[in-house]
Amino acid sequence: AGSRDDQGALFSVEAEGPFAGVVFNRPLDQVFSYAIPKRLRGSVKVGQRVRVPLGRANQPITGYVVWIEPSAAVDPGKVKDVLEVLDDPPLIDGVMLELTRWMAGYYACSWGQALDAVVPAGVKKQAGTRIATCLIVPDEVRLCRDTWTLPSRQAEILELLCKAVGTLTVTDVCRLAKCTTAPIASLRRRGLIHTVRRRMSRAPVVKPSDPTVPEDDHDGKAPVALTSEQSDVLDRLAPSLAGDAFATFLLHGVTGSGKTEVYLSAIERVVARGKEAIVLVPEISLTPQTIRRFRRRFDRVAVLHSHLSDAERHRHWRAIASGEVQVVVGARSAIFAPARKLGLIVIDEEHESTFKQETTPRYHARDVAVKRAQLEKLPVILGSATPALETWANADRGRYTRLTLGRRVAERPMPRVDIIDMRREKPSKGQPAHALGGLMRRAMAEALDDNGQVILLLNRRGFHTFILCPKCGCVLKCGACDVALTHHKERHTALCHTCDAEYPPPDRCPSCSCNTLHYGGIGTERLEREVREAFPNHVVRRMDSDTMRSPGAYEQVLAAFRARQVHILLGTQMIAKGLDFPDVTLVGVVNADTSLHLPDFRAAERTFQLVAQVAGRTGRGERPGRVLVQTYAPDAPAISYAARHDYLGFVAQELPERKKHHYPPFGRVVRLIARGPIEADVVAFLDSFAGVLRGLADPGVLLLGPAPAPVMKIKHLFRYHLQLRAPTAPPLQALLRAALPLADPPHPIELAVDVDPVSL
Ligand code: ADP
Ligand code: ZN
């Protein structure tokens, strides 16, 4: 039960008929019927992309075949023909059709938009492939080839072609058999071989047993002996790993408790049954270190990350689809990996907001994973030291099974965390503000003297974080966005972090022309300078999206840090997650408040998570670790609970706050965002649409707005939003279904729907 074929039957992947139902990557909530012309009968299949004419102009457009039907949904006289089939075999199977149909309903997008998100661009473009003329040996020749008496050269080539099953071109044969084209031509004249046009990979043929792994990564490290807590957890998972039933587990394990070991052991069990696993990790944690851990334990690991070229991604995708891969490790979109014998899904750091896609379809990979597991009848493990409150509540409600790793492995203690009240560390008059207070500097000196390594977190890149005119009070903003500019000294620019526009750093205020501009605030670039000055005898490296631009930079810095050639590693949240270095004895949070005051109901949760995660980067080896947290809000619960490693305490404090305002997990939120170039038009449209929504909404639905979005202008487009809230999802879904078809924003205004938004 639960195999692909059963699921496929739901959508009659094998169905035949004269008409195809086709959907498009456009906001069209409809399946269009097309006739399959005689010449294409039998070659149009469900899950393929096809070219078809659309609209009055009959513009050819690419769509996805979602079903084959015996009769058309429109007047058979008016139905248009399918023009061309783009993929063979089909890209999409029955489970993915079902999953995307669910996504379309849940995330209020069209089925075609959801389908288009499932297939990587490189696959759609068939990147890294070419059409080649290949030589094939017909079956009747292959089966009785011994009966032919041929010149030895030709016999040799015939043998080669029989083995190559139609994958070699004339050039390939000449190279492999070290021959000219003459014997090949003779074989063709004799009718023993002929040619076929087929799509081939440009990449050199990879060993089928090992599609993606460089040789030297197999160092055959044996699995560790599990701790008693780890094996208890594995025992609880065991029945699901051995069976074919849907189940969701929340693995709540403190940092360093060995969650990854649990994933590896769980995957081993399903792989031993001939099944495959998908592991999602946040893009940021897709480090060589993480990948190595999986490759040590499994022979055939495919990694889907953003640095792959289209051709590589296509190759990996094909390898997965053909069953050559045991484990797929990847970021958000890897949840759509075409594994056909899936047995387990793991979401590591399930609380991470990067699992949410911020363009249509705005899906959350964790929630899609749970749905996919339900459709394919398999277990899913959501792991985190700081689970999202939604996930926690689902465990409380009994929907997810909670498993706990409460202690670090090897009796390692959790690090001691001290909060430093920065209000008392004010710089003396006339001195420039420092990023590091006296306590932090002393602790760093001690750790370094003691041969330890230091990690410093500051979640703001750039040198100065704002440019202000003290005369007229204006903050310098991007010309295209309602966003303050950040001064990047190394790049000599004032940079917009939203649209990447660069401006020369001004020395005069653009509004009042005075020349007393104040550059203020501390970003990672400025922190780096301060640290270098304070610790001139130590090696410092900065890790943020400015220094990590070149491919491989990240790996280089981490390798140097591991080899202890770097003593102090500082950076943005890039360094907060997942890193496992045994000699880090001090973690410093330079400013814990960067995310605390954002106008978002999750601000406290995010701050708690960031502090708890970065604190988890120390005390992971023999030596105990220590954490110092600089803050101007030492009493904020998010910070004080994180300092005590008290997730349960934080939850107990935060949940009632959420409940009071009907925020998730005690209610659902949908955000509707309109954007357009003329502010008044955007407001007018959203005002009238709010009226439509109010008219249709059931009384349990709360409608807030229109209000300016937190970032009111991006790339010259003004943004306003509406918020819908209700205790449960169904009334919101019903409202969207009824209202969205009536929305009709006037050109060029666009309306985006964000169901379960992760930022407001
Ligand atoms: P988490 O993902 O919970 O932060 P990890 O799985 O990264 O924890 O484990 C933390 C460290 O402990 C790693 O260096 C890992 O190799 C080690 N470790 C995990 N399980 C065991 C075990 N059973 N015995 C010894 N070391 C272990
Ligand atoms: Zn901008």
Image (cartoon, grey):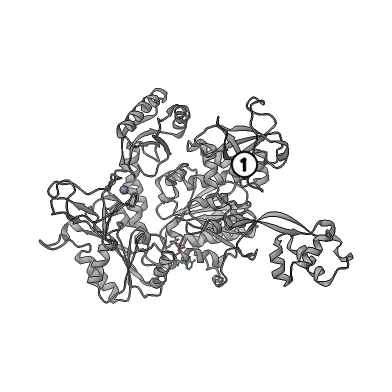
Q: Compared with residue 432, is residue 370 higher up or lower down, i.e. above or below?
A: above
Relative to 279, 76 lies left or right: right
**Residue 248: horizontal and vertical position, in percent?**
52, 48
Give neighbour class at mark 1: few <14, some 14-19, many 20+ (Cα, 10 Å).
Answer: many
Q: Compared with residue 31, is residue 633 higher up or lower down, i.e. above or below?
A: below
**Residue 394: horizontal and vertical position, in percent?**
46, 43
| Quarter where residue 614 is shown | bottom left
Q: Residue at x 68, y 29 (%)?
A: 71
**Residue 382: horizontal and vertical position, in percent?**
48, 51
**Within 8 Å of ligand 2, the CB of disc 1?**
no
State the residue lying farthest toward the top.
695
Residue sitting nearer the eye, 514 or 742: 514
Residue sitting nearer the eye, 494 or 712: 494
Quarter of the image for the C terminus: give it.
top left
Q: Please, what secondary structure does the residue beneath circle 1 have?
A: strand
Q: Residue at x 40, y 68 (%)?
A: 558
Relative to 210, 169 lies left or right: right
Residue 660 visible somewhere in the drawing: yes
Residue sitting nearer the eye, 57 or 40: 57
Q: Circle 1 sits on which residue?
A: 50
**Residue 538: horizontal and vertical position, in percent?**
29, 75
Q: Compared with residue 414, is residue 17 higher up or lower down, i.e. above or below?
A: above
Question: Identity of the amino acid at label 1?
Answer: Val
Relative to 103, 595 lies left or right: left
Relative to 454, 70 lies left or right: right
